């Protein structure tokens, strides 16, 4: 039975769904229309969603077999096509768009880049690229998101849009079937590869503990542990609970050192580091793990010639495991089924990340885009998404057959509690998709994505400044603070009475503000003045007229003059540093009574100031200080300057002995 209102691909998908469910299309339509309101729009798409969700529940029970023979990839891709073009009108529009594309370009590479095939495209599709020449069927982001909300194999619904951007960056944000089919099959292959890895020496993994990554074995790249001045090559293994390092022996490995990443109450710290001979930070290829469960930091190096991609991968994966357990602890997720569901989603995320790194080897994607917790730990307001996720997880009453837990169970990675759960009981209690309890999650994720784009644009402008050298940054700094010179010059004119009327006005206002205790009002007025300046700048479009700051690096000085000026600058800096050290040492001498006479004088002055502050209101002291500051620069008083007083104060300061300083090296 074919419905005229549906597109050909939608009719084909409904027929396949009926075969999987052992029923007819007519029976599915009748069941759908029992709950469908006639006035509701989008009848065709709702019908496709209803039939596909029921069929996928049955399909997920044998997903391992369906992935191997390619039927899952083909059917799920057809479902996405049917979702995008459910009605006959959608099909006509799609046909027109394809025809227009073929007029613009005859082959797939030009369709993608407009000029030539991107290197990532060649690598991703490899030997199946010729099949894409006539491949007109491809799906977009929304269809991919819908499919992953039903079967979270290709991506997790929480970070599916970030994953889709990375997967389709080289194909104009459209996912073609050959690439999708290869991607799904490679995920299955990688999970089988993880199951074949050897357990760390002397360790018995827990029933729900599985290896996520391993390096350092005979057929893999080296991993080196640094302990003081010695280095120990070995094998490094990461599971969903811990990190294991096994030092290499002649033909085997020593007993593994276990770092428990799931332990709470421990401050887990992992960061990048540089290593080299005698501790010199020459090669930025290492990570350092620190926590209270270790007596000394664990330093692991991942030797590479050209980059630090291995180190970055390990760093990201270790953080992901730590953040997983922190999430479970923070939101008090205690149900074994729900805990394992989050473990399963993490394991699938790691598998997807490894597959994409193998497929896209030249321009590696952003690692965090395929991992759940690392992504939203770094994104602005990502904690809101994790809160929504925990709420939805707590509301979940049963594990769906298409959930991450059951997908991994069919792929031979399971929790013992799932072995006791009967499929029939789960099917009877299941309705809808595995993530139907996330109504507000999509909205929160969309908001986070928009803010992440804004932050990304802002960070891109910052990186340009960071790439400049010391000299250029100094020039930029002096150029940025140059407006302050005008402010300081204007203030200097006020306090020196070069503008007497303005000086009298400022002095009077300051006296009134201090006497009336209007400091808060004055600060508020200053803030409102800043707001007014910003509004004025927006009205005059200052940001558009001056969209960049020009800093000139040229100089009228010769090379010799520049060198001499640099030497003078260095000498002046050295003198300033010496003066600062001497000042600190003299103050220390006074505090420690190394100069008893000076200490007594300072104590008497401090006592007098304290009594003055107790007796006289502070506002009068502040008024007197302010008026003295202004009046001391008045031309009528300059001839009365206290020359003798300044000289005696300088002589008193110079007579204070400093605390002796002895410089020694470490060996003496």
Image: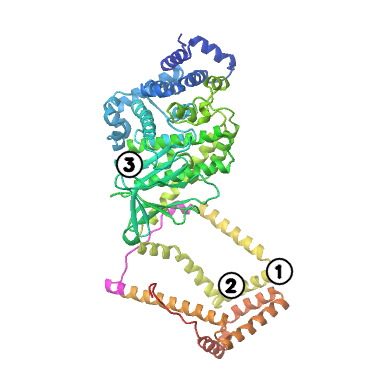
Query: CB atoms at circles 2 and 1 under 8 Å apart?
Result: no
Residue 114 visible (yes or no) = no
Q: Is residue 127 left or right of residue 43?
A: left
Q: Is residue 241 magenta?
A: no
- Span highlighted in magenta in the image: 541-563
Q: Which residue is mark 3?
A: 363
**Viewer-closest of 578 and 4:** 578
Distance between mark 2 and mark 1 Cα atoms: 21 Å
Q: Which residue is mark 2?
A: 502
Depth order, front residue of 126/294: 294
Q: Quadrant of residue 554?
A: bottom left
Q: Compared to 436, does 647 lie above or below? A: below
For marks 1 and 3 on the same chain, the one whose residue lies earlier in the sequence = 3
Instruction: From the viewer's side, name the closer residue of 412 and 589.
Output: 412
Q: Nearer the viewer, mark 2 or mark 3?
A: 3
x then y, percent, for residue 329: 56, 43
Q: Which residue is mark 1?
A: 516
The residue that appears at 71% across and 76% down in the rendered structure is 614
């Amino acid at each position: 039975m074919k419905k005229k209102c549906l597109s050909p691909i939608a009719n084909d998908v409904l027929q396949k769904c009926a075969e999987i469910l052992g029923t007819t299309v007519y029976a599915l339509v009748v069941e759908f229309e029992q709950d469908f309101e006639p006035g509701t729009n989008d009848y065709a798409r709702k019908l496709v969603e209803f039939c596909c969700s029921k069929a996928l529940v049955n399909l997920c029970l044998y997903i391992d077999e369906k992935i191997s023979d390619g039927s899952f990839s083909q059917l799920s891709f057809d479902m996405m096509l049917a979702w995008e073009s459910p009605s006959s009108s959608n099909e006509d529009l799609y046909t027109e768009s394809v025809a227009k594309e073929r007029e613009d370009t005859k082959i797939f590479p030009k369709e993608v880049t407009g000029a030539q095939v991107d290197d990532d495209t060649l690598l991703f599709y490899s030997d199946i690229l010729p099949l894409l020449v006539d491949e007109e069927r491809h799906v977009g982001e929304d269809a991919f998101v819908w499919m992953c909300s039903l079967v979270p194999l290709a991506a997790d619904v929480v970070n599916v849009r970030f994953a889709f951007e990375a997967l389709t960056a080289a194909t104009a944000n459209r996912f073609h079937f050959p690439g999708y089919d290869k991607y799904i099959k490679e995920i299955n292959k990688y999970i089988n590869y993880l199951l074949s890895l050897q357990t760390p020496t002397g360790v018995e993994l827990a029933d729900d503990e599985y290896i996520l990554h391993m390096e350092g074995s005979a057929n893999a790249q080296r991993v080196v542990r640094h302990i003081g001045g010695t280095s120990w090559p070995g094998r490094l293994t990461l599971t969903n609970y811990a990190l294991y390092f096994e030092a290499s022996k002649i033909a085997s490995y020593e007993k593994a050192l276990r770092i428990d990443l799931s332990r709470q109450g421990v401050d887990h710290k992992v960061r990048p580091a540089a290593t080299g001979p005698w501790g010199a930070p020459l090669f930025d290829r290492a990570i350092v793990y620190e926590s209270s469960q270790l007596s000394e930091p664990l330093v692991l190096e991942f030797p590479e010639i050209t980059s630090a991609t291995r180190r970055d991968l390990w760093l990201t994966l270790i953080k992901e495991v730590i953040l997983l357990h922190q999430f479970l602890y923070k939101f008090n997720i205690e149900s074994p089924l729900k805990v394992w569901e989050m473990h399963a989603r993490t394991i699938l995320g790691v598998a997807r990340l490894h597959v994409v790194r193998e497929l896209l080897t030249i321009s590696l994607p952003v690692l965090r885009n395929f991992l759940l917790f690392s992504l939203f730990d770094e994104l602005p307001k990502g904690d809101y998404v994790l809160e929504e996720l925990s709420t939805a997880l707590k509301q979940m009453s049963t594990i769906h057959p298409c959930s991450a837990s059951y997908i991994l169970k069919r792929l031979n990675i399971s929790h013992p509690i799932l072995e006791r759960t009967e499929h029939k009981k789960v099917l009877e209690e299941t309705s809808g998709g595995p993530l139907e309890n996330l109504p507000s999650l999509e909205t929160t994720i969309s908001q986070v994505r928009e803010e992440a784009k804004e932050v990304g644009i802002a960070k891109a402008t910052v990186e340009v400044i960071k790439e400049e050298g010391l000299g250029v940054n100094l020039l930029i700094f002096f150029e940025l603070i140059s407006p302050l010179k005008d402010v300081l010059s204007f203030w200097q004119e006020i306090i020196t009475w070069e503008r007497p009327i303005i000086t009298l006005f400022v002095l009077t206002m300051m006296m009134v503000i201090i006497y009336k205790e209007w400091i808060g009002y004055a600060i508020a007025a200053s803030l409102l003045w800043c707001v007014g300046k910003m509004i004025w700048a927006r009205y005059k479009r200052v940001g558009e007229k001056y969209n960049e700051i020009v800093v000139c690096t040229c100089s009228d000085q010769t090379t010799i003059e520049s060198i001499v000026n640099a030497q003078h600058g260095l000498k002046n800096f050295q003198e300033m540093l010496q003066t600062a050290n001497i000042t600190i040492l003299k103050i220390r001498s006074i505090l420690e009574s190394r100069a008893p006479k000076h200490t007594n004088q300072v104590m008497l002055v401090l006592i007098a100031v304290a009594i003055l502050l107790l007796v006289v209101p502070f506002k009068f002291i502040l008024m007197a200080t302010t008026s003295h500051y202004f009046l001391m620069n008045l031309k009528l008083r300059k001839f009365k300057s206290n020359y003798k007083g300044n000289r005696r104060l300088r002589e008193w300061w110079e007579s204070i002995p400093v605390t002796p300083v002895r410089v020694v090296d470490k060996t003496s």
